[in-house]
Amino acid sequence: MGKSSRTGIVKTVPRVLRESRDFASGCILNLGLITGVVVFEWSLVEIAFIYLIEIAIINLLFFSVALFTPQPVDDLDGGSWNNEPTPLQPIALIPPVYWRNIKFILGKAILAGILIGAVMRPVFSSYGLESGLPFSVGLAIGSIVFFQLTRVWRYFIANRSYQDKSPADALEFAFVPVVELYLMLFYVAAPISIVLAGIVFAIDTNLNSRAWLLLYLLPIGAIRAWIGSLDPNTDDIDLGFS
């Protein structure tokens, strides 16, 4: 192997690893859910609980970072977007926030909170938190927080890259889980549930075994890995916030 070939590999491998980081992380997170089902005997309620907590964490982090992005939203008319934004800096240790950003994201944040809360309420009531979280579930949530913080750092904080972003850029990240949830409900949960209901009706078998959950988790993992391979900073995902 020539020197130029080795140099090309050295340059290419780190780039490919960086580009596939979210794809690999989606696979790892779903593998964690499968491990939880097999090893820690998680139920469907616990899986739904963890996933909804993840959506809430993503929305909280990326709605927060949207406050600090000074660039205007493309194709949005109005004096506040055509002029330099007025910074508000209540705490010197954090970057300034912008009033136009607050107005832009407020309605979307309230809507997201209502939707997430409406789905969370029955799941939380079924799960029951009176006795506290199992260690395995707490560890999963802690891993989610760490992973999402690394994404915020990589896309918005490192090298102060938030200065080149608009609030719409951050909202693209915040609402990607909503796209995932739609795909999972309509293309995984609904058809698989119908098939399993047909099996129960046809052969009168018991589907209470946790092994049946893998029929949900494997295609869910494929969807999450595919979504993770898309870049919200490009046209790969366009949720139309402009």
Image (tube, rainbow, N blue to C red):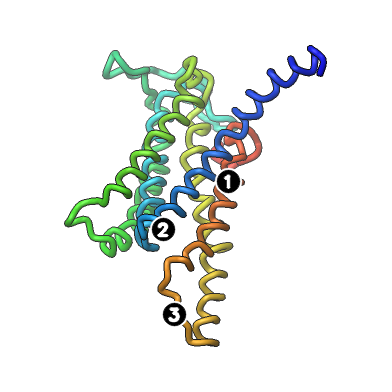
Q: CA distance from mark 3 to mark 1?
A: 31 Å
**Which secondary structure, mark 1?**
helix
- Residue labelled with disc 1: 225
Q: Position of residue 185 (x, y in %)?
A: 51, 62
Residue at 40% x, 28% y: name it.
67
Residue at 55% x, 31% y: name it.
77
Seen in the picture, residue 87 relative to 133 is either above or below; the reply is above
- Amino acid of disc 2: Val
Mark toward the start of the polypeptide (2 vs 3)? 2
Q: CA distance from mark 2 to mark 3?
A: 18 Å
Q: Are marks 2 and 1 in contact (CB under 8 Å)?
A: no
Q: Neighbour class for label 1 at 10 Å: few (<14), some, many (≥20)?
A: many
- Residue labelled with disc 2: 37
Kindly report which numbered mark, 2 or 1, lies closer to the viewer in this rendering.
2
- Evaluate whether residue 126 shows in this view: yes
- Evaluate whether residue 103 shows in this view: no
Q: Which mark is residue 206?
A: 3
Q: Quadrant of residue 115?
A: bottom left
Q: Is residue 32 left or right of residue 123?
A: right
- Amino acid of disc 3: Asn
Residue at 56% x, 39% y: name it.
24
Outermost residue, left direction?
Answer: 130
